[in-house]
Amino acid sequence: MSMEEIGKLVDRWLKDEKFRQEVRKNPEKTVRAAGVNFTEEEWKALRSMDWNCSDEELKTRISKGM
């Protein structure tokens, strides 16, 4: 996973409450719409994440590469 792509995702997650809500509802659709480019392996990791975790825990997981 490129650090640039992780940075995009984390930055948006931290700054945009609506984005966080949308990611929780439909992670893949929302992240794709944000223009983040992941490999297939990274998409699998995104799909397998528990989006019911706290914002802080999710931020930590995302910044570590899911």
Image (cartoon, helix red, strand yellow):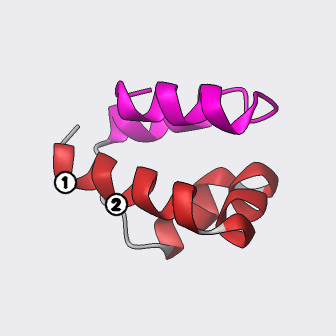
Question: Residue 31, position in %: x, y?
Answer: 52, 61
- Compared to residue 58, the image places residue 30 above or below, namely below
Q: Is residue 55 magenta?
A: yes
Q: Quadrant of the C terminus?
A: top left
Q: Nearest the camera: 26 or 53? A: 53
Question: Residue 37, position in %: x, y?
Answer: 30, 59
- Residue 4's label in the rendered image is 1
Residue 42 appears in the rendering: yes
Residue at 35%, 28% (x, y): give it.
Answer: 65
Q: Nearest the camera: 48 or 19? A: 19
Q: Dots 1 and 2: beta carbons under 8 Å?
A: yes
Three-letter amino acid code of the residue under disc 1: Glu
Three-letter amino acid code of the residue under disc 2: Lys
The image quadrant of residue 41 is top left
Q: CA distance from mark 1 to mark 2?
A: 6 Å
Q: Which residues are magenta?
A: 40-66
Q: Please indicate whether residue 44 sits to the left or right of residue 52 in the image.
A: left
Residue at 71%, 65% (x, y): give it.
Answer: 17
Classify mark 2: helix, strand or loop.
helix
- Compared to residue 3, the image places residue 36 above or below, namely below
Q: Please indicate whether residue 12 sits to the left or right of residue 48 in the image.
A: left
- Residue 8's label in the rendered image is 2
